[in-house]
Amino acid sequence: MAKGIFPQMSIPDIINALAGWSISVSPEQLKSPTPDFVEGVYCACLQQVTDLSHDSIRDPVQNALNASQAEDKDLYASALTSNIILYHLTRFAKAARVDDFNSRDVFSPERERTIVLLSAFINFVKFTEQYCDTFLKDLRERSDAIIIQRDSVTNQLNDIRGQFDELSSRIAKDKPTCEKLNAENTALSSTMLMTKDAQTKAVRDVEQYKADRNELMNRKASEVLNSEIKTLEDSIQRTRARIVQSPERIKKTISIMSNTAIEDKKTVAMHESKSRDLQAKINALHNIEKDVRGCIEQIQSIEREVQSLELSQKSLGELRYHLEEKVIERNELCSRQERVNDQLANAKLKLERAQKHAEDKKTSSQKTIVRLQQEYNEMVVERRENDKQIEDVRDEANQVEANMHEHLKKSEAELNELLAEYWKLRYETDIYMETLANKLNMRVISE
């Protein structure tokens, strides 16, 4: 007998409680419960708490059988459904403080046991309706939200896998370009360093050339000033030389002036060659400035390319970071998938065990059916023999009854004759007693 902390209900209370859930039950069904009736009522109580029913587990059972690729799926579907319902009913009974619930309570119900179990289930359902509705509602909402979140995560996983495949293909496609760009970057970096060294050297040369030019300009200005001074001095000397002092002195002055003129011509020729050299140097400096400007422009373009390359490397680093994140997520998802596959393998193993157990039960049931059939045939033969014996005994009983009727009739006739003789003898006795009393003058009291 089940023991629990729940009060046992009477049949009218059970009928009223089930009627409140739109479950019609008659007293005769509770007094003589059948397996179909008991299973239907238990599943209705289970549905009030967990929303589980035959309809809700039909699709999962079918999916499990389709995944198992078993033969005779219709044969296993009902057995698997019954086992799942029995499993949930057992959990439901344990929650209702009935620890000894088993399959016999469903497939071979008893009146008292069924009333006790219904009392436990109804009390538990009323308890959950009274105290657990808010919690169950919240739990179901969170469960629905988790299911929606799982579907969303599955869709995101598919999108991420698509993006990961796309990024992998793009990376594989851009890898030669990246290697080429890295080689070009290395070459450009070395070229830039060489160009920068050349630029530094060219800038130093330009500064040196500018200093030389300034120095030459200053020297030229000082030479012009000296030449003017000399010209003035010459003019002064010529003016002084006009004043004739002596012929010798004039000759000497003329020779000096001729020598001076020759030296001035040499100086002018030398200055002209120097000016030509300076002009060539200035032209070379202008060409160097143009080359330096071109180098600067090339360096600026190289710097822009370097900046774009750095941006590309930065975006490549970000892509690699995202790729690593996606790889980590992919590994996590792969581990989750492995766990799910392990669970699926365990479920398949359990299903195979259940199938094997069902096959063993089927084999044993077939053997039992064959044995029962043989026993039934033997019982039929024995019954026929018993029927023959019963017919013989019945004939003997009829014969005995007929003999009894005859003996009764004879006994009744003899008894009637004896009674007639008794009353006749008694009447004669009464007459004799009265006659004797009259003769003896005695008073006789008749009984």
Image (cartoon, rainbow, N blue to C red):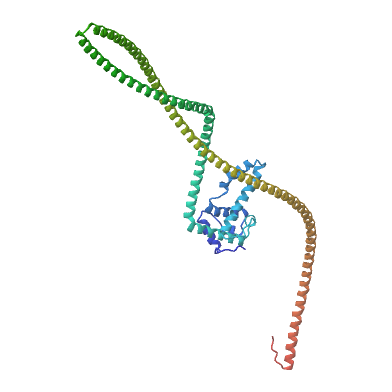
Count of marks overlaid on the render: 0
The N terminus is located in which quarter? bottom right
Q: Position of residue 116 (x, y in %)?
A: 58, 61
Q: Is residue 205 above or below residue 26?
A: above
Q: Is residue 303 above or below residue 238?
A: below
The C terminus is located in which quarter? bottom right
Q: Position of residue 264 (x, y in %)?
A: 30, 11
Depth check, front residue: 224 or 312: 224
Q: Residue at x 58, y 47 (%)?
A: 57
Depth check, front residue: 68 or 269: 269
Which quadrant of the figure has residue 257?
Answer: top left
Q: With 252 as the anchor, is 31 left or right in this view?
A: right
Q: Position of residue 88 (x, y in %)?
A: 59, 53
Q: Position of residue 415 (x, y in %)?
A: 77, 74
Depth check, front residue: 280 or 342: 280
Q: Is residue 246 above or below residue 16?
A: above
Q: Residue furthest left?
A: 243
Depth check, front residue: 36 or 193: 193
